[in-house]
Image (cartoon, grey):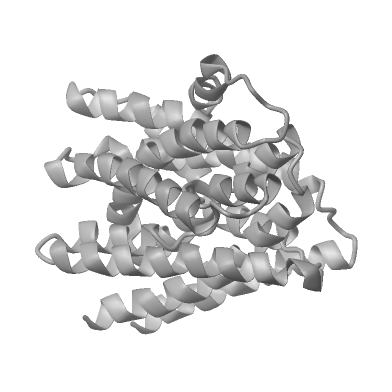
Amino acid sequence: MEGFQQQFIISICIILLGYCLKRIKILKESDGQTIARIVFNITLPALVIVTFDQMEMTLSLVSLIFIAILFGVAFAVIGYFSFRNAEPGVKGMAIMLVPGVNVGLFAFPLVEAIWGSEGIQHFGMFDVGNAVIVFGLCYFLAGYFAKGTSTFYLREAIGPLFRSVPFLTYMFVVALNIFDLHLPGFVLDTAEIISVANMPMALLLLGLYLNFSLETSWLPFIGKYLMVKYGAGLILGFTLFWLFSDYPMLANTALIGFILPSSTTAVVYAIRYKYQTQIVGTIVNITIIISFILIWVLASFVAYH
């Protein structure tokens, strides 16, 4: 337990380092775009390759793909009924934000610190289903509720999914696992060296993206959104945690996965469909802080459970 708490303290220090480097102008928030491309296209895929090479495919792991998809659909429905009476711009923004979560950037460094390769395997499978929600369902919802938008192009929704290097890496390593194939040793050794950089770079990136600008006029909407997201997430998460009590890592993944921060991809969709980008960015930042605290508390609960 002492090592687990130490890992969280180290994670906080790295996040604060990124934020401080931005504040003293050694790094700029725009530098985060370059770091994000390195994380998503190089270090994260390397971590997935190394972790999944020795993975034994089980029903528990495969079920996480469908759990993540069902979770996203359920949250879209919850979001719709929670904000159905809001004005169109606000309704679309909220419904777009509710279903998807940030697994690759936010969860992986913490999960790796707490549960090691087993945690990465489970959250990686969860992220396969989450990718379908983020790049498919959330994109559809953003366009469907946008003002002045009457046409939805399926190719535009599916395209980002199959241009996502982490998603394609998941598909590749799962296919290798199914056919009991393995990459050459030198490839795995190289990937292992690269993967070590994923945790510090991802945490540093979170610090660079932290932004605490907040207008009081946004508070009612943000407060309602947070209540819907975390209220539903905790209720469903604890329900599955008890239902899957015989499968500890599956139960842990459901519990933590449902309260992860809102996906940063929502900011891209907000720009694309002319929602209030600053509010979306603020919500993503707030959920990063809240989720970090909740994961600390829930992981401590799991450790003592």
Is 111 displayed left or right of 157 in the figure?
Answer: left
Residue 49 visible, this angle: yes
x then y, percent, for residue 278: 78, 54
Is 254 displayed left or right of 136 in the figure?
Answer: left
Residue at 26 percent of width and 40 percent of height: 66
For the residue pair 13 and 72, the one nearer the viewer reads as 72
Is 96 displayed left or right of 211 in the figure?
Answer: left
Which of the 4 image quarters holds residue 92?
A: top right
For the residue pair 97 and 9, the one nearer the viewer reads as 97
Q: Quadrant of the N terminus?
A: bottom left
Residue at 62 percent of width and 31 percent of height: 143
Residue at 54 percent of width and 36 percent of height: 141
For the residue pair 169 and 7, the one nearer the viewer reads as 169
Q: Give the residue at the far right of this rendering.
A: 25
x then y, percent, for residue 118: 27, 54
Residue 125 visible, this angle: no
x then y, percent, for residue 116: 34, 58
For the residue pair 120 and 233, the one nearer the viewer reads as 233
Q: How many marks?
A: 0
x then y, percent, for residue 266: 62, 44
Location of residue 65 with respect to 148 vertically, above or below: below
Which of the 4 image quarters holds residue 241?
A: bottom left
Residue at 23 percent of width and 39 percent of height: 54
Q: Give the residue at the far left of this rendering.
A: 246
Location of residue 161 with respect to 226 vertically, above or below: above
Q: Quadrant of the C terminus?
A: bottom left
